[in-house]
Amino acid sequence: MGIELQFLGAAGCVTGSQFLVIVGSRSVLVDCGMFQGSPEEIARNRLPFAFEPKGLDAVLLTHAHLDHCGRLPALVKGGFGGPVLATHATVDLAEIVLRDSAKLQVEYAARWLRKHPGSTAESMAESEALNVDDPGLPQRLRSASA
């Protein structure tokens, strides 16, 4: 039985740690980090995952930095319902990090909407993102990070 390892983040950049380990029919995601930095890197947070979240058996969280745990909410929203394995301390810290990140994102969106009356959160994302509707973009970004 072979082991397959896919580097899905933190390759070619520092943030967005995410490694998929597949052994037979089992798959474990090691970290699920948020991309941070340039607008191009941040736009990667809105791309679909390179795998089906429902198909994961587990997530192994190495530590609680946002660039290692920040996309866990998106993973759950995408259908992941399995266990997240981590130390008790990592779980405690990840909760603080994720709540703080959510608060900052809500505050940022509120500021943006105040400065752009009549606009929506969707228009905010569109105005600041790459053209994520470009069907070739996910593959180009994944190839660039390989």
Image (tube, grey):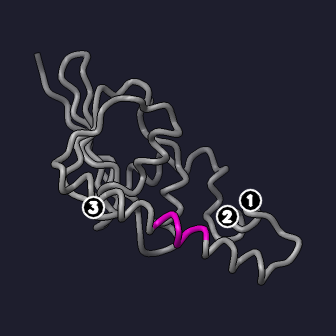
74 in relation to 52, above or below: below
Which residue occupies the foreground of this view, 123 or 104? 104
Circle nearer the viewer, 3 or 2: 3
Q: Residues within 10 Å of mark 2 (few under 14, many from 20)?
A: few
141 in relation to 78, above or below: below
Query: Bounds of the magenta span?
Result: 101-106
Which residue occupies the foreground of this view, 75 or 3? 75
Asked if the residues shown at circle 3 and circle 2 are in contact, with their CB atoms under 8 angstroms apart, the answer is: no
Residue at 38% from the left image edge and 50% from the top image edge: 143
Q: Is 36 left, or right, of 62 in this rendering?
A: right
Residue 127 placement: quadrant: bottom right
Which residue occupies the foreground of this view, 133 or 46? 46
Residue 103 covered by magenta stretch: yes
Whole-number angstrom distance, CA of label 3 to CA of label 2:
28 Å
Would you say the magenta stretch is mainly helix, strand or loop?
Answer: helix
Residue 142 covered by magenta stretch: no
Q: Earlier in the sequence, mark 3 or mark 1?
A: 3
Q: Is 39 left, or right, of 81 in this rendering?
A: right
Element at label 3:
helix
Q: Position of residue 108 (x, y in %)?
A: 61, 75
Q: Amino acid at mark 1?
A: Glu
Q: Residues within 10 Å of mark 1 (few under 14, many from 20)?
A: few
The residue that disc 2 covers is: 125
Q: How many marks are shown on the rendered structure?
A: 3
Whole-number angstrom distance, CA of label 3 to CA of label 1:
30 Å
The residue that disc 3 covers is: 93
Q: Amino acid at mark 2?
A: Ala
